[in-house]
Image: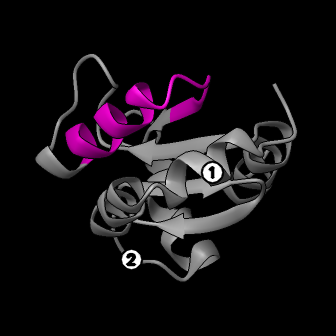
């Protein structure tokens, strides 16, 4: 499966997907660390994809999403954004509302 189809499949099959550098327990950058920390606080299962371990996704996702950086958070097949957007939405309570309305898992 090519990278774009893999990305489409991950996003379609999982309500919440975080493309990040590293893992939630061992993040490889501060932005990915903060984003995964916030998602863990929301207490809803999510798929994470370590783009450092998946170079095909790392190179294809920015073009697919039209978003150049990582992390990238997708909820219900919609790109939410990166770390600063995740933080702002979490602080306002908007992120929790979105996450509570996920339709899969």
Does 80 appear above or below 17?
A: below
Residue 26 in which image quadrant: top left
- Sequence-wise, the earlier of marks 1 and 2 is 2
65 inside magenta stretch: no
Q: Quadrant of the N terminus?
A: top right
Residue 63 lies, in percent from the top left, at 55, 78
Q: Residue at x 46, y 78 (%)?
A: 67
Determine the secondary structure under disc 1: helix
Report the residue that reaches farthest toward the left: 30
Q: Residue at x 46, y 63 (%)?
A: 59
Q: Quadrant of the C terminus?
A: top right
Report the residue that reaches farthest toward the bottom: 66
Q: Residue at x 50, y 44 (%)?
A: 18
Residue 99 lies, in percent from the top left, at 64, 44
Q: Residues within 10 Å of mark 2 (few under 14, many from 20)?
A: some
- Mark nearest the camera among 1 and 2 is 1
> In the image, which residues are magenta?
32-48
Foreground residue among 9 and 84: 84
Q: Find disc 1 in the rendering and name its residue.
A: 97
Query: Which dot marks residue 68?
Result: 2
Residue 4 lies, in percent from the top left, at 72, 60
Query: Which dot marks residue 60?
Result: none
Does 39 appear above or below 77?
A: above
Q: Is 76 situated left or right of 56 in this image?
A: right
């Amino acid at each position: 499966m090519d990278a774009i189809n893999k990305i489409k499949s991950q996003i379609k099959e999982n309500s919440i997907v975080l493309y990040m550098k590293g893992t939630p327990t061992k993040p490889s950058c501060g932005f990915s660390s903060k984003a995964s920390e916030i998602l863990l606080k929301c207490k809803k299962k999510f798929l994470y994809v370590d783009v450092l371990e998946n170079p095909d996704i790392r190179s294809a996702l920015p073009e697919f999403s039209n978003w150049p950086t990582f992390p990238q958070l997708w909820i219900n097949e919609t790109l939410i954004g990166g770390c600063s957007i995740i933080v702002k939405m979490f602080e306002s309570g908007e992120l929790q509302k979105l996450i509570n309305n996920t339709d899969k898992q």
